[in-house]
Image (cartoon, helix red, strand yellow):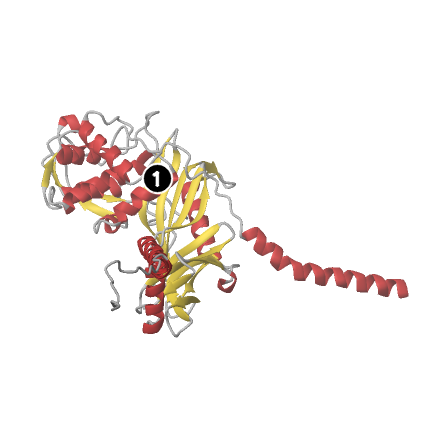
Amino acid sequence: MKIRRGLSVFFLFLLLLSLSLSPTALAEEESEIHIAAKAALLVDPTTNELLYEQNAHERLYPASLTKVMTALLILEAVERGELQMDQMVVASESALAPIPFDASVAGIKAGDALTVENLLNCILVVSGADACNILAEAAAGSVAAFVDQMNERAAALGCENTHFVNTTGLHDDDHYSTAYDLYRITMAAMDCEKFMPICDTRSFTLPATAQSPQRTYHTTNYLLSPYRASGYVYQYARGVKTGFHSKAGNCLISTAEKDGRTLLGVVMGAEQVQTETGGKRVESFTEMVRLFKWGFDHFKRQTILSSREPIYELTVALSERDFVVLHPAYDVVRLLPTDVDVDNLERTFYFPSEVVDAPISEGDELGEVTLSCGDTVYATVPLLALTNVDASRLLVFRRDAMEFLHRRDVRIGAAAAILGVVALSILVRALGKRKRYGKKNHYTQSTAYRGRKRR
């Protein structure tokens, strides 16, 4: 009976122990994620904070993600006034000739006239390779010249592992990019006012042309619309661009907005796999949703530094006050892992000088503080004087006097003056001694004295 009781207590203890440990173990397991793709990236585009990366700098084939750069150059030409959104562009034979029969196209024919905005919709919504070349000729005169501009723009954005051969992403061994470079290109495109509204479009109607009737096209992005495939829609998703060819695999750039937060993800080289029910699953979409959910669940936006916080007392010289209070120049809000406590962030201070001379004016920049956790730096912020600190006239005078006396020319002059005084004193004394002891007294009798005559 005692043995049974002992075993019961023992097993109860094990059960309670397992229950107490399981949430922690689950949290640790969920805090790590691996994306089923060749490369992946998750960023907070508001602050450019990198939340997750997987082979982000590996050169891969970008497929139609290339068209983000094509759209970027067209939209920048619009912003410069070189093109207009309502400008009519006529499709030429030279623009359409390089497009292979199996490429993704919008069905535009030579001689069709469409607006720049129509063609941008064809590029970003239905991934039309034909529209890319048509706009490239309109913007640069030829497709080849436009591709040169694409490479120049990529270099200007700091894309060190990107090289374009065409405007479309059709396969070429020398046409490559990385998840990180595509993030940079997408961020530049998102600065263009018209970019995201077009990327968000679920469907649009292409007007009739002389050779084709009016047509309605639906987005290739399964996260936005179930029209092409069901089971993928993610309610928080916005844009951006899909891509696929046999050597690139399935690629996707997307953003998501939830509870006032925005995330940007890149997935490259995902597969299309067979499901248990005999269907197919395109993992660029499912993995992107996993990435977004992980980012929203495991990071929270927190104020890690407040501009109102008195953060340091810096020693002051030449004043009746011993120190000046410093505060951060501005508030810093960052996405932090949910297991990171703001109060435990390490603060590293830097000052050009450990002691600063008065006078000091409110708002003077006197140093900086860096907040970090392990190897991750979250912010480096200037530190400003909270109040004015007046200088003491007496202390300033004493400082100036000491500095004057310590000047090399003053010391040399003073030494020369002292030597001159010493030399002069010695000379005066020497001359005085000569005058007192150097002359002898002589008494002489006059030979002309005759005295008194006797009679």
In the image: residue 455, left or right of residue 61: left
Where residue 5 sits, quadrant-wise, is bottom right
Q: Quadrant of the C terminus?
A: bottom left
List x then y, in percent, for residue 55: 45, 38
Residue at the spot 54% in from the left edge and 52% down from the top edge: 30
In the rendered image of this protein, does residue 58 appear above or below residue 79? above
The residue type indicated by label 1 comes to Asp
Give the x, y percent position of residue 159. Answer: 32, 37
Q: Is 154 situated above or below 79?
A: above
Work out whether residue 122 can be spotted: no
Measured as percent of width and height from the top left, residue 327 is found at 38, 67
Q: Which element type, helix, strand or loop, lies under badge 1?
A: helix
- At x 19%, y 32%, the residue is 146
Rendering quarter of residue 72 = top left
- Mark 1: few/some/many CA within 10 Å (<14, 14-19, 20+): many
Q: Which residue is mark 1?
A: 181
Residue furthest front in the image: 455
Q: Quadrant of the N terminus?
A: bottom right
Q: Quadrant of residue 114?
A: top left
- Regarding residue 326, the answer to whether it shows in the image is yes
Report the residue at 66% width, 62% height from top.
20
